[in-house]
Structures are given as structure tokens and as C-alpha cells.
Image (tube, coloured by chain):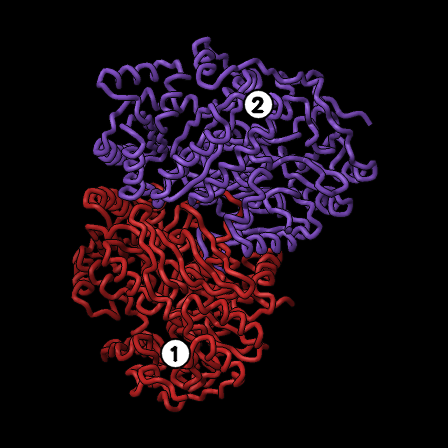
Chain colours: A purple, B red
Amino acid sequence: MPEPAGIEPTAPEPGGGEPGGPAWNGWEPGAAPALSARTRRALARLLGATEDTPSVPVGEVRLPPSALLAGTRRRFVELLGAEHVRTDRAARLAHAGGRSYLDLIRLRDGDASGAPDAVLTPTADEIPAVLAACVDTDTAVVPYGGGTSVVGGVSGAHRGHAAVVALDLSRLNRLLALDETAQTATLGAGMRGPDVERALAHRGYTLGHFPQSYRYSTLGGWVATRSAGQASTGYGRIDELVHALRCVTPTGELRLGRGPASAAGPDLLALAVGSEGTLGVITEATLAVRRVPPQRRYEGWSLPDLPAGLAALRELAQRLGPGLAPDVCRLSDPDETRSTFLLSGSLPTRLARGYLAARGRNPGCLAIFGWEGEPDQVAFRHRAATRTLRAHGGLPLGAAAGRSWLHGRFAAPNLRDTLLDHGLLVETLETAADFGALPRLHAQVRRSLRDSLGRVMVLSHVSHLYRTGASLYVTVLAARDRTDPIGQWTAAKRAVTETILAAGGTLTHHHAVGTDHRDFLGTEIGTAGLSVLRAAKAALDPTGIMNPGTLIPPAS
Amino acid sequence: MPEPAGIEPTAPEPGGGEPGGPAWNGWEPGAAPALSARTRRALARLLGATEDTPSVPVGEVRLPPSALLAGTRRRFVELLGAEHVRTDRAARLAHAGGRSYLDLIRLRDGDASGAPDAVLTPTADEIPAVLAACVDTDTAVVPYGGGTSVVGGVSGAHRGHAAVVALDLSRLNRLLALDETAQTATLGAGMRGPDVERALAHRGYTLGHFPQSYRYSTLGGWVATRSAGQASTGYGRIDELVHALRCVTPTGELRLGRGPASAAGPDLLALAVGSEGTLGVITEATLAVRRVPPQRRYEGWSLPDLPAGLAALRELAQRLGPGLAPDVCRLSDPDETRSTFLLSGSLPTRLARGYLAARGRNPGCLAIFGWEGEPDQVAFRHRAATRTLRAHGGLPLGAAAGRSWLHGRFAAPNLRDTLLDHGLLVETLETAADFGALPRLHAQVRRSLRDSLGRVMVLSHVSHLYRTGASLYVTVLAARDRTDPIGQWTAAKRAVTETILAAGGTLTHHHAVGTDHRDFLGTEIGTAGLSVLRAAKAALDPTGIMNPGTLIPPAS
């Protein structure tokens, strides 16, 4: 039976990926910005030669033949219809990996060996039967949302099973319920960020969850990976927003969450959140939403240096606290601040630089603060934060800098595509720690990356404030080792991860574990913690088909 | 070897319990208030005859002989020293049960069959060896903090094991660390509420966790039962305050929590919190603390009726939200309001009543709001709440009513002792639900209790605000069935629990599961949820010695 028209695109997408999805080998199709000659010269000066390193064309990618047996395929087709069981090259390539540096380097080099054998697009109701069929046929299942994992969370390697399918949740894309009294929304797991906000905005609400991957990442992915959005200081992490969820496992469905809070034993919702597809498929979640705030106020500030900036953030977190502190708080370190001035030619950036120079100030630490809510609350909170920031030597840079940040907040991955074309290693990593540990953590992460990579730009910011600490987010740029780029980053990543854990940081604040962090999870949760995770998995997924190799290290 | 002097009290305590602990058969020794003749007449009129029903004297309590074998005892003595292995009557009786109505009714009737065979008081370092000895000797372990469970969480029934010991954590009573940069405190599990606040106040900090059981309950108990304090709207539930903990299990120690937040897989901390001693012994926890607030402002308000009061609370929770809403929010329903006016002869109460009468208002719904923090924040938040409350018909009753509530906030269990002496059934129950479900839940709980108990006083308040809902706390008074008081309440409790679950409420908002709610846990978390809990227990406690019979229903 031929595939129905409209499912298999007759002409390839501009980015070679799925309709509406990211490019097969990068981020937004056709959106990678050109570098100015000045910026290219600066990168060459700072990092060494930046030769051109274009991706192979999509037609040259090496894709292994699908290992799906005919009988297994037939069973899926009976369950879902042929149009929802795809083994074509385009579908498999579009699901061949996440968006980490390592994933992209492999794809750009033509290596799609991580592609699944088939891509299934079931409805929510069909998922229990699909999982039953997967158990029967020893088919591994990779629950697939936006495919934006930056930790190897959606790699389709077989890992000892007969075949592997990507369970693409794009049809679970509806706002299922909006309770305007409780202010909760029940959302399908496959809704992308813009789908979520569009559906809610139509009714006057917002979730307020804006990770950098917002354009492509999905609600189910956020929940499965314990995501934190850029406004998490004010709106809360996804863990805090989720009130209930449904998770289909090979042995039955978890339906968790009842009312706003409970003491009915351990919070099992917290076991499903962050399970990264290893226990089951999160099909929907009910989350706290808010009325769209009538006022949004975003500003740039300059703090004299990192210690002053950290002291200011700590005071915002502790003297004001969640609810009173700004909803968005981001503090760039001096290197990230300088690189913002270097890489951004925007008018607000140039004006800010001129303003600081006129006052005899170094660039110092650029910071962004945002307040959202009713005007009187925003005014009071803004006054309180302003007092704190001024007390720590802060200078306001105005609303234009805030608008500029808001405008560009999801665009960094497009710049990464450009830099990948120019011979660079570009990757991010992140952690969180108590306030007392942050300065040393910051210094040691920088030193570790310099030790591993030599000439390097390490750009850091502190964000996502909590009462006791904050996250540290780090962007790394270096000249790519052309002979062994994978080995170059793998070694540096291992060293910096060990550094983070030794300095008291968490393995990951919002990128999740995936395969990249998996072998360090034992350091974070201990042997007893691993045994609990393995026991939960054995209870829900006894044959181990759910996203195997991810999150949970194999028992040694 | 004789017990060293000073361990076995030479003269019994006034309450017959342990030094500094609650009375063996009630709450604060000697603190039960006398009822006025007017109140007694009112209770008789409302509920029927209230005959005197004094407790048996402590000397007449029937305690089964200790089942601890001599060899097992010897092993404990080798590990802990004889003074920390008590099998004497006083120690066993003081650990014979929690403080639920059913526990107290049994004890007051002379039935201490739930007493453990021995009471161990190890240090934290000794606990792993104690658990190993318990595994070897098939001795069940009841981790014991303040003994204030109101859901049968510390009953020492053998439940198929050779013997049972109460593991009294009273020696784990120190502030172990205070990190003034992160504002976290590491506290021993055995610290009682006043110990915690005293140790922190000495350094200028507060935890802000004030459950009604505060006087006797312990940090470890709060964490093990997912406690919520009366100021949880502002300070957060214990789940939100805990950043790290250590939990000794029979197969190893769980050390969980790293920094302020993480995405390193599921939050296993949330599996230890609320585990009610069934997975292991929580020995210490690190919690977020705050500077002692320079200002505290508490006020009484009167709302015209329950719908208006609930609408006001919902607006505080959603338009202001945590951080801006009052730290304490409590709204009594009309019956609780009337009974406050009836049972309290305090000056503020009488003044409030007169003030309302002078304005031609019914008592309506009494409410208490509290704000804590820096003066400018308290002032702003107070203004915002005042606008909301006035918009819903609220009338302020002034600071005296707030002070009166603060003063008496931990005293209700003393009044219960009095009422138990006067032939009454007195028990509390609680749940939480989304705002939309609360009115029906309130009505149905009242109807269920009336249907079960006939003439009854059902006094309810809504407190513990969240963005999406709130808790509902219910006090029940009825004439006690003298022939079968246990059966009378067991049947009513079963019916009202089914009613709560059917109406969308959680099984328990902060009392925990214990044995009383155990057989309903499957309704809350489902078959798949139960299988996860059982798998976690099997991994950490393979011989099932940890608080057996509690929390997790037996597999059928």
C-alpha cells in the first residue's frame, strides 16, 4: 500500500527535517546568522584558525538499513495504520539524535547510525497496545518529543534489543482541559512550546515555561527531563508546575497527582518527572497556569564584578524570595559579558557599552532582570530589586537591553549552527549549587575546560535563583580537533563533570542525564539510590525496552 | 546489671510518659483545660449526654510481656549499652502508640497491646549496625520521633516478625550545621519543634515549620510524613524545605540532595520524604531556613460566608501567589466559627463577636491571616490582601484576634484531652483539593459524618493555600459509643475517606498514611504506583522489617 499523500513530503523541507521541526543537522532551518568579518577575526585571534567545516549534504548521510522485522512492522501497521509506521529515510533521519554538540557533529559528518529502525506516531489511546507489541517483539522504545535533548537522551541505539522505534508524540498535541477555577491546564505531551502558549493565550493564560529549546521542545519532554525555563525563578521549574500526569508503562498506567498537595506517602509524581522515558511514556500532564500578566518589565543592569553580582542575586533570593524577587534573573560573568559586547552588534548593546565607558566602568557583569504581573506588584518588586542592585554597585542599563534579551532569548542555537560551520567546538553545560559553593565552582569549571581544551572561551551565567543557591550555565568555544572531535569533547566533558561533582554541584540542573551523564549518576544519588531506580524500572518495565541505556547506568 | 540511675525515672512523670514528652494517654501533662458549665451544657444540648469517661490509671494498663529474646537483647546491649536498650514498662508504654483518637481510646481503656517489645535509643552512627542486628533477628523496627502520629504510624504491632522495637531518635537532637550563605540548616532527626526553633533562633534563623503537633513532633517525623506547618502558605511544606537528607536502610544509606535543584533523574529525595519509616530511618536533613523576620503581623477577619471566603482565598493564592499572599491563611466555616465563639471565652473573641453584632453581621466565617518579613514587604502584602478581602465583603477584626490565635495555636490537643474525659468522640481529618472541588468536598464530608455519626459537630477550616487549591481540615465531635467506640469511628472514618476520594480530594494533606489510610492508598496512586512503592521497599528493605504494616498495603 503506498503511503498516503501529505505524510511523506514530496519535496524535502528546507532544513531536511520534519515539517515544522528543526533542521536534520542543526536548529532553525535557514536561520543561522552570518558572522561579521570583525567577529570572525576576533574568534580566530582568541581560539586559533577557524576553517570552514560545512555539514555533508543530507543525501550523503549514511543510514543503516532498518532492523525492523516484517512481522513486527505488520503488527505496528495493524495497530496504527501504515501512515503512522514510517521506515522511510526522511523520518528515520529526522529522529536520528538529539541536538547536543556530539549528536550534531556525528550527523554533520554523515553518521546517522543512531537512527531508529522506525518512527511510530500513535495517538495516546494506542500507546498501551504499542508498548505491549514492543514487549512481545523485543523492540526498544525511545519516547520522542521535540528531539532537542542535549545529553543524548533520544539516541536510537539498539542496546541489545531486536530493533528500536522512536515513539513520536506529535499527535498528542492538544490542550485537553483548562480548569479556570484551579488555574490548571491538561496538555498533551507532544505539544511544542509555541503550541502550549498559543493554546493557553487564546484563553488568557500562560504556563510561563521558556527553556532555550522552547521553539521545538515539548511538554512531555520538559516533564520527562525536569526542565527549567528561563523564568523559573518566578514561574517555577516544571517539577513545581506539574500537578498530575499520566504515564503509560509496559505493565500499566501511572496516573499520579491529586489536588494541590498531599502527604499520601512518597510523591511518586516526582519519580515519573525526570524519568526520561525509561519507565514509560508520559502522555499528558496537568500543570498550574496563570493569567497572562498585564505587565512585563525587563531591564539590563551592570554589576561591577562577579562577587558583587552574586551577592546581589543572593540578596534577591533570600531577602525577597520567590514571588517578590524578579521572575527572570540572569547574571553573566565578565567573559560572557565581553563576548556579548563582541558578538552582538545590536544598538542596545552598543549603547550600554558606551554608557558604561562614559562612567569609567569596565563592562563588569551584564545582568538581565524581568518582572511580570499586575502593575502595582511589578512596581513594588521592581523598587525592592533596584534598592538591592544599587546597594551592590549595580547600574541600570534600561529597558532596551531587556527587550534585546527577550528578542534573542531562543536564538543561540542558530548561532551555534554558524559556529559549527566555522571549525568550532561549541557546547553548553550546566549545574546548580548552593550560594557558598558557586564562586569556587565557577572558577574550577573554567580551569578544567582550559586544562582540557587549551585556547578556549568559557562564558558563564548564573540564573534560576532559589533561596539556597542558583544554577550555573556555561558555554564553551574552542577550535575543533578535526581528527578526533568526539574524543576531544568527550575527554573535556568527563573532566569538567568530575570537577562539578567534586565542587558540590549537581550533575545537571536542567539538561537531564541522558546517555552523556549516565555514568556519573551514581555519584549524585549513591548505590542505594541507583538500586531504587533500578527496582522501579524493573517493576514498570521488566523487559527493559523503555529508552534503554539512558539515565540508569548498567549494573556492574 | 541494674539500669543506671537517671534513665528509669525514680518518680513517675506527671503525665506518666517520658521526660519532656506527652502524657502516656494524651497531650501536654496537666494542661487539659476545664470546661465551663455553659460549654458543658452546650455540648450536651448539641451532642447528647456527655458522661464522664476518665482514663484508667497508668498502673492498670495491660501491657503484654516483651517478646524480645534474650539473645537479641544481648546483641542490642552490646551495640548500644544497656541504658539504651529499655524493656521496662514505662519506656514501652510511652512508645505504645501515636496520638490518634483510636490510639488514645485504646490506651485510656488500658489496652497497650501496641507497645513495642523494647525501646532502643541509638546514636546516628549506631543505626546501621542496629538495623543489621534487626535483619538478623527478624526484629521489626518502628522509627520513633515524637510519637505524635494521628494515623497509626507508630504502632508497634509485630505483624509477623519475631519482635518489634521502637527506634527512639531522641539522641539525634543537635543542630549539626548552619550554612549562613546558603541559609540551610542540617538538623538531627530527633529534634522536637521547640528544639529546632531554639537552636536556630540562637543564630538568628527560623525554619518556620509549625504543625499543631509542634511541641512534641520531630524533624525526622515531619520529613518522614510530608508534614505541613500552619505557615506553609508562606514558608512552604516540609517537602519544599528539605534540600538533602540521610536515610539509613537495611541495605545501605540513602544520601540524597545536592544543591538547590537538579534534573539528575527522578527526585529520589521525594521518595524518602513521606516514606514513613518503611524504607529506612531518616537520621538528619538539611533544610532551607530564613532570617527571623523582623516583623510579624497577624489579624482576624470576618468573611460573610464560605463561598465569599473561598473566593477571597483563591484570589490571594492566584493573584498574589506564594511570596506575596499572607504566610498564614485560615478560613473557618460557619460551624467552626460559631464553635470558636462558643468554646473560647477569650476577650478578643468576645470583642469580635460584639463588633460583628453591632454591624448587624452574622458570625459568618472567621479567618486568620499572618504576614512575616521585612516591614516594607509586610506593609505592601498587607495592603494587597486587605484590598482582596474587602472586595469579598471581609471585615477586619484586628490584631488581638490574630494574637489570640497565635497564642492558642498548639493547644487544641489539650482541649481534646478534656473532651475525651467527657464522653466525646473527638477526631480530626484532612484533605486537599483544587479550588473548584472544595465546596462540594466540604458539603459531602459534612454529610458523610452526619450520616455515620448522627448528632455531630463538624468544624472545618480551609488553610495551606496553593495556586491551584487548598487543604480542608475537619474536627469531628460526637457522643462516644461506649460499647464499641473503635467500631463507631472506624466505620465513620471509612465512609468519609471514601467520600473524600470520590470527591477528588487527596487521601491526606499532611497527616500521612500510617495504618489508618493504608488500605486506601491504592485509590490515590493506583496499582502501578503501589508496585513502584513495593519495589522500592523490596530493594531497600528486603526482609520487610521497617515499620511493617504501615503505608504500603499488603499485596492481595
Please name the residue shown 55% across and 28% down the image.
Answer: A216
Residue type at mark 2 is Asp
Where does the image place residue A68, in percent across and percent down from the top left? 78, 36
| Distance between the alpha carbons at the discs numbered 2 and 1 | 83 Å
Residue type at mark 1 is Ala
Q: Chain of mark 1?
A: B
Vertical relation: A198 (above or below) B396: above
Where does the image place residue A137, in percent across and percent down from the top left? 78, 44
**SS under mark 1:** strand
Do we see residue A291 in this rendering? no
Q: Quadrant of residue A167?
A: top right
Q: Which mark is residue B479?
A: 1
Q: Nearer the viewer, residue B101 or A417?
A: A417
Q: Chain of mark 2?
A: A
Left/right placement of residue A484 relative to residue A452 reads right
Q: Which mark is residue A481?
A: 2
Q: Are marks 2 and 1 in contact (CB under 8 Å)?
A: no
Considering the image in quadrants, where does the N terminus of chain B appear?
bottom left
**SS under mark 2:** loop
Where does the image place residue A169, in percent across and percent down from the top left? 63, 36
